[in-house]
Amino acid sequence: MQIYDSSKKEKIKFIPQKENHVSLYVCGPTVYDDAHLGHARSAVAFDLLYRVLNANGYEVTYVRNITDIDDKIIKKSKETNKDIKEITSFYTSRYHSDMSRLNVYPPTIEPKATSSIDAMTDMIQKLLDKDTAYQTSNGDIYFDISKDEKYLSISHKFQNEEEKQQRVESVEEKRNSGDFALWKNAKDDEIGFDSPFGRGRPGWHLECSAMIEEYLDSKEKEFCVDIHGGGADLLFPHHENEAAQTRCAINKEIAKYWMHNGFVNINGEKMSKSLGNSFFLKDALKEYDGEVLRFYLLTTHYRSNLNFNTQDLESSKKRLDKLYRLKKRIFGIEADIKTDFQTKLLQALNDDLNTSKALSLIDEFVSSSNETLDTPGKHKNLKKEISSNINYIEKVLGFGGKNPYEYFQSGIDEETKQKIQNLIKQRDTAKKEKNFELADKIRDEILSFGVSLMDTPQGTFWEKA
RNA sequence: GGUGCCAUCGCCAAGUGGUAAGGCCGCAGCCUGCAAAGCUGCUAUCCCCGGUUCGAAUCCGGGUGGCACCUCCA
């Protein structure tokens, strides 16, 4: 496999530290609201990586955290007058159900920040002991970036002398303007955890370093994890700070490879809460099947930005529809045959997850399969190959696994389905009697349910339009 | 202001030195009672200007335009 390392800024051969085993850590969501498409993009991108690693025969330990203590959560708690725990458990389960709609596998381990407080305070203690961290008079603890010689080596952010010496007025006791909080002292009524340094809560960057050490660190190896991933906006300062903490606390680099996914843009601008242009995944899921959204998110290479628009989403739906129509044609046939197509598909994905290439291979596979199926004959072998290929597509790309009839009829209630079936029978009768005028009239009626009809030698089928 | 990414057909999008994949849309045809679905065919010289090279969308230099990070952010 080749992957693009966003810290080295080049595509390089992927070699895990342990043979046949990969440790993967991805920054997960802060659970204070529903997930938007951007969260979905990141989850889908790394789910794809997870699947492709598996397809290459690696055993993968995949950790994705849940940030369940944070200023935004506290804010939400105050606004809604709800307990923090209530908010975080609610949005965690919402996140899980949204992601499962997108066929995103659960990670191997999904630790919560609040469950790793001890690991975090241990790390802070190590940093305090080395004077790489310091406590201010109000009880907050900061990381001193000047103590880390390799600071900025991950993001390559340039900081000039002026900037380095510049003090942020609000925190006068900070040694360097770039110093970041490891521990925030709890004010009177705020939520807090007891620690050797007083009651408080951890800084955001700290949890990933602590969790990686707790769950993934291969002690005897050079790097804590093989791959560390997240959204491109996390490269700086989040990942830079994580790396600094780990480097200074336990004297090793946190990750061998860094991978960052691009954004979902709306009208050319990054989708974000603060810009007010985000929309919830759950709303998109009302209109489109989760697999359509997943397919759409995969049309653009994970590192590029994806400019959201419904025209392209529609185009993705049509491409996925075609795969499912092919699946209908071989319905009932199950097989597991190795094919050239599968090799090519994996090859494309092994090249830094080239999904555009992979998807184009699928289009060609669907088209050529249909072409052959259109010629007279039983095509028994071909059908087995098609079935195997679709199963493989589901395995590595995460779509195409549904029952094709259910896929096309999802969102239509039973009563309507029954009505449609009855009308189809009436139309069949009219057709047999060559009463095409009536048949067409009935078809118009059926179409008004928002479905389309197709007459085949096997009978008349309908699909949600 | 500092740092970085990007610019390929109406739309989406691969290709990163050897003569432009694929999809959507559109047009024509086959099939069909008519449709739908499916199939076939047709549609670009790669933002601009220089340079390197036998050869560049691909490398270098200079423009222009867009976006991101530097503050919470997938």
Image (cartoon, helix red, strand yellow):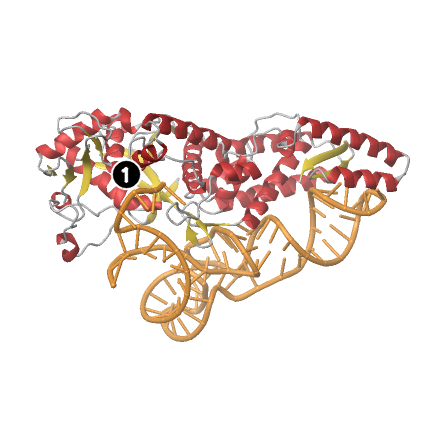
Q: Residue A296 at x, y = what percent? A: 52, 43
Question: Residue A368's quadrant in the figure?
Answer: top right
Between residue A89 and residue A124, name the one nearer to us: A89
Residue at (68% x, 29% y) in the render = A380
- Figure quadrant of the C terminus of chain A: top right
- Figure quadrant of the N terminus of chain A: top left
Q: Residue A438 at x, y = what percent? A: 86, 39
Residue A224 seen by the camera: no
Q: In this view, does A270 lie to the left or right of A128?
A: right
CA neighbours of label 1 inside 10 A, class few (<14), some (14 to 19), many (20+): some
Q: Residue A293 at x, y = what percent? A: 52, 40
Q: Residue A413 at x, y = what percent? A: 66, 29
Marked residue chain, label 1: A
Above-or-below relation of A418 to A39: above
Residue at (68% x, 26% y) in the render = A414
Pointer 1: what residue? A256
Tally the numbered discs. Answer: 1
Between residue B41 and residue B24, name the one nearer to us: B24
Amino acid marked by disc 1: Lys
Between residue A133 and residue A82, name the one nearer to us: A82
Q: In this view, does A234 lie to the left or right of A127?
A: right
Q: In this view, does B41 lie to the left or right of A15?
A: right
